[in-house]
Amino acid sequence: MTTVDDSPLNGLVDLVEASSDEMARELARFRMRYKFAIDEVSTKIAILREEFEHTHDHSPIEHVRTRLKSPDSLLAKARKIGCPLTLAALEQQIRDIAGIRVVCPFVSDVYWIMEMLGSQSDVDVVEVEDYIAEPKANGYRSLHLIIKVPVYLSDRAVDVPVELQIRTIAMDFWASVEHSIYYKYDGTVPTTLRDELGAAARTAADLDATMARLRSEVHGISAH
């Protein structure tokens, strides 16, 4: 049986013309390991959430969304970054094939989730981008992690990367509106709207700080 690691995905033309059925099957097997990684990390998050709810005064997670890049999105990303269209290259160069977004009530929950996941022996934290401590120029705030988790297949175990985006409700709302505006204007957003988005980002940050302070005053606690 041919393994996905050794099988070439020689280009978009190959998918359409040359051995398209076999290529499609190999790409499906390749994507499947990322789906399993999403399941693995989602289970870990669900366990942390349930345990936390039993021992603390609130749930640390409002909701979780998962995303597995479609074949079209995967190929488009590869072409955008100049990644060779082979499965081995896709595995090495594209680390957001599997994505999970975790939305939390408070900023402290964001860092708690990172700490709890990162402390697990089978989770390897590969990269951390803290856009909460250092927001992007447009005001975007979120904590991004690339982690690797083992996925146990029938013939071997493979370490699979998963992109985690962990943010508060306010951050998520702002990011959703910002994305919609940039989509509507095809990336060319009028200056006045960009300025308003920047002001809204600051308001969202202030809201997070205010809600954390109010919770601390009401419950007499600082973080959890």
Image: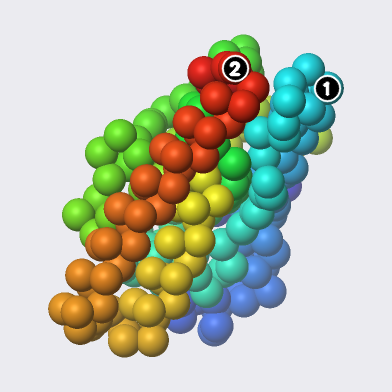
User: Can the viewer see residue 14?
Assistant: yes
Look at the numbered discs 1 and 2 and tell me whether their residues touch, using CB distance below 8 Å: no
Q: Where is residue 14 in the image (x, y as percent from the top left)?
A: 49, 76
Residue 191's mark?
Answer: none
Q: What's the residue at 26%, 78% (across, down)?
A: 193
Which residue is the extreme one toward the bottom? 185
Q: Mark 1 points at which residue?
A: 54
Residue 199 lies left or right of residue 217; in this view the side is left
Which residue is the extreme one toward the left? 191
In the image, 147 versus 179, the foreground residue is 179
Type of amino acid at the residue the image marks with label 1: His
Residue 55 lies left or right of residue 8; in this view the side is right
Q: What's the residue at 42%, 28% (across, down)?
A: 126
Type of amino acid at the residue the image marks with label 2: Gly
Q: Name the residue under label 2.
A: 220
- For mark 2, give the secondary structure: loop
- For mark 1, give the secondary structure: helix
Q: How far apart are marks 1 and 2 (CA)?
A: 19 Å
Q: In this view, does 37 lie above or below 16?
A: above
In the image, 218 versus 185, the foreground residue is 218
Q: What's the residue at 59%, 17% (across, down)?
A: 220
Q: What's the residue at 74%, 21% (across, down)?
A: 56
In the image, 171 versus 159, the foreground residue is 171
